[in-house]
Amino acid sequence: MTSTECEPRCAACGYPVRVDAKCAECGRDRESQLRVRRRRTLVRWLGIPWVGFVALFGWAYLRGNEQLCFFWPSIDTRFAAGYSDAAFNAVAPDMSAAAVEHLLGKPLEIVPAADGSESWWYTSDGAAPFGDWAWLGREIVFRAGRVAEINSRTYYD
């Protein structure tokens, strides 16, 4: 081991320096060198999670098929005005259409079926400003003006 390998080095630039002196290369004293090192370490540790986040988000986006966004499941879901999950969960079978409308407001879409039933959709696809993600479907099916089915599921279309 040579004497240069044992010498202390500037924490900012790596140049050999005496402990009690300023660095001849960058001119920083020991306290300034340590501040630079701490700042670089902080940037490194804060930067790594963001790079991972962007990489994971980009990978899911570039795959081409709809994926559920695990940190924002409703990213691609459009909701009807006045909709809330709490109100949707309060809907019960055999409620009247007027009671549901009072609770949830007007649906985004009403789809009549051939058997005379109606599907009231309170959510739809296409809210994400980028990409095509899975969306949360919320549907209430009425038969003879009463709630027959309450459907809540994730659509990957």
Image (tube, grey):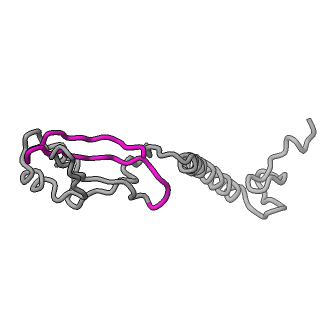
Specify the farthest residue to the bottom.
Answer: 27
Q: Position of residue 64 (x, y in %)?
A: 55, 48
Taking 126 as reference, is 144 above or below it?
Answer: above
What residue span does the magenta drawing correspond to? 129-157
Closest to the observer, 69 or 152: 152
Quarter of the image that includes the N terminus? top right
Residue, x 15% and y 58% (percent of image)? 105
The magenta stretch spans residue 86:
no
Find residue 91 and report its horizontal and vertical position in percent. 13, 44
Residue at x 60% of width, y 50% of height = 51
Residue positioned most to the top? 1
Q: Residue at x 63, y 50 (%)?
A: 44
Q: Residue furthest right?
A: 2
Looking at the image, which is closer to me, 113 or 19?
113
Residue 120 position within the rendered picture, expressed as x and y whole percent measured from the top left: 20, 51
Residue ranking furthest to the front? 114
Q: Give the image quarter of residue 29.
A: bottom right
Residue 43 percent across, percent down from the top left:
61, 54
